[in-house]
Amino acid sequence: MNKGSTVKISGDVSIVLCGAAGQGIQTIEQILPRVLKRAGYNVFATKEYMSRVRGGSNSTQIRVSSRRVSAYLDRIDILIPLDNAAIPHLKKRISPDTVIIGDSEKLSSDLEFIDVPFSGLAKKIGGTIYENIVAVGMLSGMFRLDIEMVSDFIMKFFSKKKEDIVRNNITAFKKGYETGTDFCRSGKFCIDIGTDKEAAEEILISGSEAVGLGAIAGGCNFISAYPMTPSTGVFTFLAQHSDNFDIIVEQAEDEIAAMNMQLGAWYAGARAMVTTSGGGLALMVEGISLAGMIESPAVIYLAQRPGPATGLPTRTEQGDLEMALYSGHGEFPRVIYTPGTLEDAFYLTQKAFNVADKYQIPVFVLSDQNLADLIYNLPLPDMSAVNVERYIIKTGSDYKRYELTEDGISPRGIPGYGAGIIGADSDEHNEDGHITEDLDLRIKMVDKRLKKLDLVRAESVPPELIGNENYETLVVGWGSTHGAIKEALENIGSNDISYLYIKQVYPLHPDITDYLENAEKTIIVENNATSQFGKLIKLYLGMEFDSKVLKYDGMPFSVEELAGRISREAAI
Amino acid sequence: MNKGSTVKISGDVSIVLCGAAGQGIQTIEQILPRVLKRAGYNVFATKEYMSRVRGGSNSTQIRVSSRRVSAYLDRIDILIPLDNAAIPHLKKRISPDTVIIGDSEKLSSDLEFIDVPFSGLAKKIGGTIYENIVAVGMLSGMFRLDIEMVSDFIMKFFSKKKEDIVRNNITAFKKGYETGTDFCRSGKFCIDIGTDKEAAEEILISGSEAVGLGAIAGGCNFISAYPMTPSTGVFTFLAQHSDNFDIIVEQAEDEIAAMNMQLGAWYAGARAMVTTSGGGLALMVEGISLAGMIESPAVIYLAQRPGPATGLPTRTEQGDLEMALYSGHGEFPRVIYTPGTLEDAFYLTQKAFNVADKYQIPVFVLSDQNLADLIYNLPLPDMSAVNVERYIIKTGSDYKRYELTEDGISPRGIPGYGAGIIGADSDEHNEDGHITEDLDLRIKMVDKRLKKLDLVRAESVPPELIGNENYETLVVGWGSTHGAIKEALENIGSNDISYLYIKQVYPLHPDITDYLENAEKTIIVENNATSQFGKLIKLYLGMEFDSKVLKYDGMPFSVEELAGRISREAAI
Amino acid sequence: MNKEIFDLPDIDMAWCPGCGNFGIVSVLKEALAELEIKPEELVIVSGIGQAAKAPHYLRTNFFNGLHGRALPPATGIKAANPELSVIAESGDGDMYGEGGNHFIHTIRRNPDITNIVHNNMVYGLTKGQASPTSRKGFRTPIQVHGVFPEPFNPVAVAISLDASFVARTFIGDRDLTREILKKAIRHKGYALVDIFQPCVSFNKVNTYAWFKDNTYRLEDSHDPSDRQEAFRRATETTKLPLGIFYINSKNSFEENIPIYGKDKTPLFMRGPDREKLTHLIRSRI
Amino acid sequence: MNKEIFDLPDIDMAWCPGCGNFGIVSVLKEALAELEIKPEELVIVSGIGQAAKAPHYLRTNFFNGLHGRALPPATGIKAANPELSVIAESGDGDMYGEGGNHFIHTIRRNPDITNIVHNNMVYGLTKGQASPTSRKGFRTPIQVHGVFPEPFNPVAVAISLDASFVARTFIGDRDLTREILKKAIRHKGYALVDIFQPCVSFNKVNTYAWFKDNTYRLEDSHDPSDRQEAFRRATETTKLPLGIFYINSKNSFEENIPIYGKDKTPLFMRGPDREKLTHLIRSRI
Ligand SMILES: Cc1ncc(C[n+]2csc(CCOP(=O)(O)OP(=O)(O)O)c2C)c(N)n1
Ligand SMILES: Cc1ncc(C[n+]2csc(CCOP(=O)(O)OP(=O)(O)O)c2C)c(N)n1
Ligand code: SF4
Ligand code: SF4
Ligand SMILES: [Mg+2]
Ligand SMILES: [Mg+2]
């Protein structure tokens, strides 16, 4: 930060709050982005945190921008360290331009910072627990947000607390607000970011919420799961809304039970799902194979984190694609969606239920900590594009669950709906579902199951090309890397480099071949160490990427890092 | 069978016995091949059976030959149906040349057969339970085996039974023997097959025994498993010999426990293994990932059977290669051996323990029902080629379990041996094994683990070329298809077609590329529906097979079928 | 209702002649018929093993899933449609070994299902290894020195988990088995019926005669509401009592599911509420 | 021995201030020191959770494996080298939820290990979902209407499985905890020590005060060899007794392993016998 002169931050600001677990950063993240958005700012927030309940160093980035933003930046314009460990924790990202706002009572740093007596102010109001709301106030002041609007929001936010706590929070907010407005006035520094009427009318949700809303839109009415970071967000979301949407929510004793319960539920007519992460999926592998054999629909939300084993429980990675693709013994079809935007997290989760039901196969929604935990504003989803398609038939008395049909799909009946008897069998079976050792029938049944892959391929979600159609270099990404790749390319600003965003990694949409063939150079971006999607492309399309941009330290790509690495690779 | 004229079977005879489970075919299979081998015949036997304890139709093929044989034939020269269901069960394989020997008291068939009163003879001796030994006698007579030698063997075989039972069995054998010698004498038909001094001195073992012996030779002293066909043979073998070889044998409550027990055992200095089939491996997936993370050796014997799910429990398939390869969340190295001969089943299992210990990684021995259940004679293994390599070090007080070394391998200490503290951690960890959230260290640890793949690649087992070096067409197979491919090509007898036998599917040996490149045409043979090894070659070598010969009805390839299909494909 | 309604035509039963499994299927059909349960409204869920083949031998809906995993899908089925009668049926290895975790947690969850366990004290299908209920000293190809641990006592464990209904019977006593099955199926909540079932092929120790000699019926005076007494009887070892040990009536899992609080409609007949969803989405503005 | 021998330098403990876990680690160090167990000869095996981090906070060998899977590797370790002292330590969710099947079968197997369970009646690490031991009515972000099932009673279940040593304590009572831990570690065979441990962040119901008010020490006169009485005490609910409920001395798993019958040498010091192998192979001629 330059001494003396007034700093003016415009267009796009990156604010980072950092402190120990338990210091209330989460509350800030729940309040500030929403009030900023209501004021018409485009906002984005993401957090990185340690696997612990108290202590350590966690940080949240809040980007406020005049244009849409959806990715993590290394750059910190404003840093609010809530404890002494914060600055060392973030040292690589602090630049001379970073404005640090801290409390000299707590902070001892060689770096210059604007001293704001957060704890002093908070204590006067009633205790240090109000520090975080003082910070909310200060930041609100810096953006000159409507005091009434924010006060109102805070009042509602704390509405379940005791009256004096609500009052103190409002006081804390107002105290902070004064400090904030004072910055520009006193010439310390000013923020100048354009607002946008649209943003004010948009929704602000997280990746977990987008998936949860998608599940509800897909008709999900049964979820059995076992808690596992970073998948628990979706489980919790559905539990919170279970009364409203008639959803049966069951925390299973383990992931094996969760998966098998889901299959029982589908068998009896539910639209069910499980949520898990890599270690939990490992335990569901046998159940996935069962879904393949009994031709049961299944929806598996898999939120990845770095492995192997327990790995880094609260970090991000795209390291479980291959496991998802090959999970289960024996051979049977499946579908894997990989949303990279909140819109797609919503639509693809919704679609997963229809596709699972229609083709009677397991469908994966593959996400990760990065996507699950970020939030930004987006337009309301188009509800007319969203339909709960049901494929259950009322059975007659001659019903055969595994009737051999032309296309491999046997109409699916459920017990108690019609006169038919519904068999489901994990052994190789005849059309009635009874165990068979007729080896000719075995061939027919294998063919029937595998045939369905062609049908689902025909319904694959096409990739999305972002950028110029006449590119030289094509950057390819799947899932949560989307926001960072997109913004990195915007920053590079080259007409020659475009980006292909893959929303379904299996089976692959045929257009992908064309896009890759049209490129002189192809670059794959993946948040893992071995380029699992690159291998999938090699395997199914016979093409190899010219270069790979990989990252596997547990953090998502930042926009700057990607811009640098992509430019370098593109130039080679 | 031609009426009137004397049939003479020479060179190679295929005898099939067929009856219900519980009729004693297994006893025949335990006696006859061994006495034939002792007499200097080359023998091979294999069985196909239903997933039930009683009833159904099971059959055993015994081939007796003047040259080595190791594969299943469709052809039946002599059929001994022990019940009425046998002939319909085998109808596709019965030809006009098939000599059927049955008991008219039980058998009603349109086909002509030589009537032998098995049950009548047996009843006279003491009951129908002696029928099977009458059959053994008859077949022994047909081969003019030494009566004393066989009587001796039978006596020892039943030595734990009561005296009168032993006596009755000997009587049954002798009665049968008379009938057998009578066939040629009376001009019904004669068998004329050359013997071989070598065979008499060779061993006769099954695939399960070969793996079990290899495990003992590899220093295995701990096995934790859960029964699952067709892997139980190895588990049982080791249990049977546990006293003799100081092996701890524990039947776990489930496969999860089995796998995790194995890791505990290695941690404390054992050389451990698990045995399982696809459904059990599905449950071990999380533990495999744990082995990857804690850098524990692990030996996993996976005997495949047709899936998905329960599938066909007693049949064969090569359908779990991909699951083995991608089992476990996150990224870490592994090795997969695929023995196709009994020799290799022995040597590769032996090697698995050394490689697992040296590189601290999971090593798979991938087999299937086909290989597990077949038997044939082979030379004694070369014990000088077999060594138990140990890599455990005595630790000093400054020992670090995950020391960052040049090649990625940290010397492995165990608790209680030296002054060091031994840490093992499923989280990302520092050199001491303690949990870390240092993301730079994360990168080092990922690199360290993945680096080991290069080392194991350098130690890969080369493929074996069988046939002319200047081939036009190269047939490729892995694992249990070996015997049938080899014999099929011998039958085709073309100088232009050679066979590449793959003993290690991952990581691939570099020679494979050269062999494939030298071929004008490549054909992959696999006992599955989707050509999983073909995909692996495409992925890692970028090559595609010109044609695929696949089979997935639960049966192994027969020699004739393969000869036909390969000739056809080679000619296209 | 006539028990023939549950007969399937042309079935080839894969069990050994003399096996106790035949009796169980036959008595179960009688019990179901006497209770007037329609085949279309019943689902039998099983795992893998000889016992687990049972649902293939009667005419009704069946879900023959994975080894050890009968209880979770049974729970899912009952939750998705509480109007169905649900039976989870498997062997001792399946239910108490591979499926042990589901066993204990399903008892806690208390879905209204009947859990029938064919207890032959051995792994039948995989040819004779010890099961959790195998007796001490039982020798097998794996347990070459005989089984060491105490046999798993499902009755005692279920009582320790305060299960809703806990019974044990022996298929040699068909009348008792039928009566217990009827009561178990009628019972609201989880009901365990552990049935001693001789495996004539792989268990040469615990035969029909052994079970006959080593079991007896609990007296009529036994009070199944007395948990301590039930536990005491469950831990008897010289002779093993048969009968209903313990009944503890309480809310079932489905009764506790909030969505069935007011409205019993099964899931497949409910539609998602678009308006509410729109409302929820708008709340995120 | 001085308990400092178990101290690790420079550790950043990831637990919340005030958490009951600190006390458990500290008392465990005391118990180990008093028993003169050397850090090099001890292995602590854990799963995943807040409790499962414990072995990172003392200087000894550790195997921090998978969630729910502490007992199988602990068994494998003890079997491979019976000279090691082995402790399996984890949380209630880990041990009784995800790991429930290992819990029941390890009790049956009876390896000579000490099983310490930090029972905070909640999933701490994953931020407050119900665990198997959560009390009825306990509300969480998942159990929005509160927990319905009866809490899992590890003490009663262990007794029903005829466990070798069964105890419960509360970390608020450090003396009792230390004495029980010492007895459990000294006990030959499997020993369960369920320790009530307040989670100050996610369990606002079962606090230090709650445990204090709702527990009491078993009288000295309690006879731990009386299984029926132990069960009766284990099923008390108004106040929860603390102490050693049940002791049933019997052969341990390792003692039953045939290879240790004559020769106690651990596996890593044994070589395979080539001659015997050659002999076995030749027997196949
Ligand atoms: C995951 C898995 N592990 C193992 C098996 C093999 N298996 C099938 S049935 C069975 C045991 C059957 O015993 P039990 O449940 O007592 O039934 P029984 O045959 O005695 O009636 C086993 C081990 C399997 N199918 N799946
Ligand atoms: C297979 C698997 N499922 C889920 C998780 C996530 N997980 C980690 S710890 C934990 C629960 C911890 O609860 P508890 O064992 O009671 O320990 P506490 O944190 O309360 O000490 C869960 C669900 C995991 N790591 N692995
Ligand atoms: S093996 Fe045993 S349980 Fe299975 S059918 Fe035969 S007798 Fe019955
Ligand atoms: S979350 Fe609970 S159990 Fe975990 S450290 Fe904090 S207080 Fe202890
Ligand atoms: Mg059984
Ligand atoms: Mg807990």
Image (spheres, coloured by chain):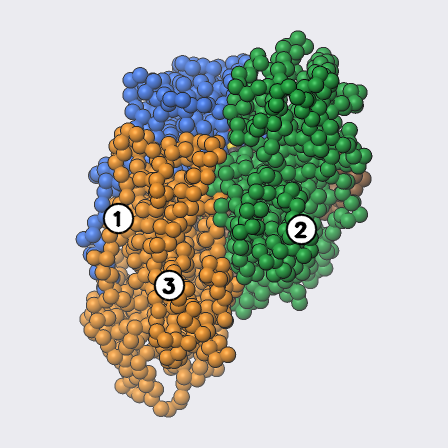
Chain colours: A orange, B green, C blue, D brown
Mark 1 vs ligand 2: CB below 8 Å: no
Residue drawn 35% across the image and 56% down it: A460
Q: Residues within 10 Å of mark 3 (few under 14, many from 20)?
A: few
State the residue in front, A306 or B53. Answer: B53
Seen as rendered, the residue at the extreme top is: B124
Judged from the image, the secondary structure of the residue bearing numbered disc 2 is loop
What's the residue type where badge 3 is placed? Asp
Q: Which of marks 1 and 3 is nearer the N terminus?
A: 1
Seen as rendered, the residue at the extreme front is: B5
Q: Mark 2 points at which residue?
A: B495
State the residue in front, D201 or B381. Answer: B381
The x and y percentages for residue D238 are: 39, 36
Q: Which chain carries label 1?
A: A
State the residue in front, D248 or B274. Answer: B274
Q: Nearer the viewer, mark 1 or mark 2?
A: 2
Q: Residue A389 carries which label?
A: 1
Q: Mark 3 points at which residue?
A: A511
What's the residue type where badge 1 is placed? Glu
The answer to whether residue D189 of the structure is visible from this angle is no
Q: Mark 3 lies on which chain?
A: A
